[in-house]
Amino acid sequence: MILSSENSDNSRYLSKKEIISYGLGQFAIALGGLGSAQYLSYYWTDIALIPLTAVSIIMLSSRIFDGLNDILIAWMVDRTSTKFGKARPWILWFFIPATIVNIGLFYSPGGSIYNKIIWAVLTYNLVNLLFSTCCMIPIQALTSLISQKSKERITLSFAGQIAFVFAQILGALTFVKCTMLLGGAQKGYFYYFSICAILAGISMFATFLGTEEKIKPIKSDKKLPFGQALKMTLHNKWWLISMGLQLGVFSLITLQSVSMYYITYIIGNMNLLTLIMSITFVSQFIMPFIFKPVVDKLGKIKATGISLLIASVGFLIPLIDMTSITLLVAASVFRGLGISGSSTTRCAITADVVDYGEWKTSHRLDAIIFSGNSIAAKVGMGLSGMLIMLILNASGYIGGTATQTPEALSSIVFMYTWLNVIIIGISSIFLLALHSLEQEMENIQKDLTQREILINEPKYI
């Protein structure tokens, strides 16, 4: 007689409640991070009037420093053992502090510019630590802790992407009008993103309540030293390769903040911002529904490659006529579809990396492996954010002015088009390498299941 383990097929049933609750976690990540990902650089340069050089240094140094902290926090998550599991408790402990610092991010103190810079450094780093690390890593790690079935992980990833983009659509439709209704300028930004932070906090708490960690490690990692855990992670080649892909994807997401500069100075009509961003996000929302059959038929890697190709078309379309509204709308559709497709599969790919690591070492390091996504997000967003500021600064861009130099306008066009295509080319190299892992996964998961059966088989004397 063989006893069923906690990781048996019966325990892996994925309920609708869990799918919705997991999706609310991704909704919280998107809504809570909406300001820092899409609007913060413009707010700092054109509203708070913080110098470009200071903004670029803050973004890069803070992101890289916090990215290094991610592995340490993730190691602590993997060592956590409570009745709620190891990832869910962190959501419970930190959703309130994360909400508070997110509210403070768009507050701008009075006094000198140095006061604003100090406040920006303080709040930005606290948001990165308490929200983007202590909450986001556990939420993402749930992808591999809720289920070990590949199809169910794909379902979670698609549900998460739909919820993530829904939050972005909500932001795109309400940002301009609501910030004006709430007082405009600094006051409007502060009240608007305070509301977003509170809604994100509520959603994170709902994720804690509605999910269950079913997948348990074959071998306990509670006492695994940090150095050994780090060594195992670094020796997992797929972890580094998947991070390279994620870094590119998050850089593309951050570069969409150039849209505010492009529409303001190239198109010359800021009122189009809501329309263009809404079209982009609606396309991102639709993509998971039409993309799932492609993933089921071709696999995660080939499908992601197709999505990157679609995105490339969207980035190049504006070059035909940079002031054409029709082409801008078409470009937004292709960009939305492409970015959504490449984002949809990322958590499922990372979950495969978790299984590979356990297969190689017998240690299951869900949080540390998923910290790679967080590190890639922060470094990618930091590098691309700094690159935007450096290019604008080098071209003579002056924040808050009605007109810009021809060099500044050219730099905005370059960042809106070719820079994205270059990043996609680099990302495709990492994507091609990951094809080998996908081919191995069926045998790896069968082997892991067999190990579970052997470990839980009763021993008779």
Image (spheres, rainbow, N blue to C red):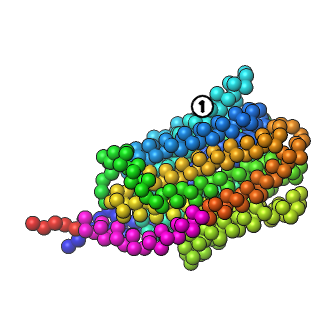
Dominant SS of magenta comes to helix
Q: Quadrant of the C terminus?
A: bottom left
- Left or right: 396, with 366 as reference point: right
Visible in this render: residue 282? no
Residue position marked by numbered label 1 in the rendering: 122
Viewer-closest of 334 and 317: 317
Viewer-closest of 179 and 147: 147
Residue 254 among magenta residues: no
Type of amino acid under label 1: Leu
Where residue 315 sits: x, y (%)? Answer: 76, 61
Q: At 72% from the left edge and 61% from the top edge, which residue is drawn?
A: 421
Visible in this render: residue 429? yes
Q: At 57% from the left edge and 63% from the top edge, which residue is drawn?
A: 430
Up-down relation of residue 398 to residue 429 (above or below)? above
Task: Magenta stretch: give its range.
Answer: 429-456
- Left or right: 448, with 455 as reference point: right
Q: Local crowd at mark 1 within 10 Å, few (<14), some, or many (≥20)?
A: some
Where residue 92 sits: x, y (%)? Answer: 46, 44
Residue 443 among magenta residues: yes
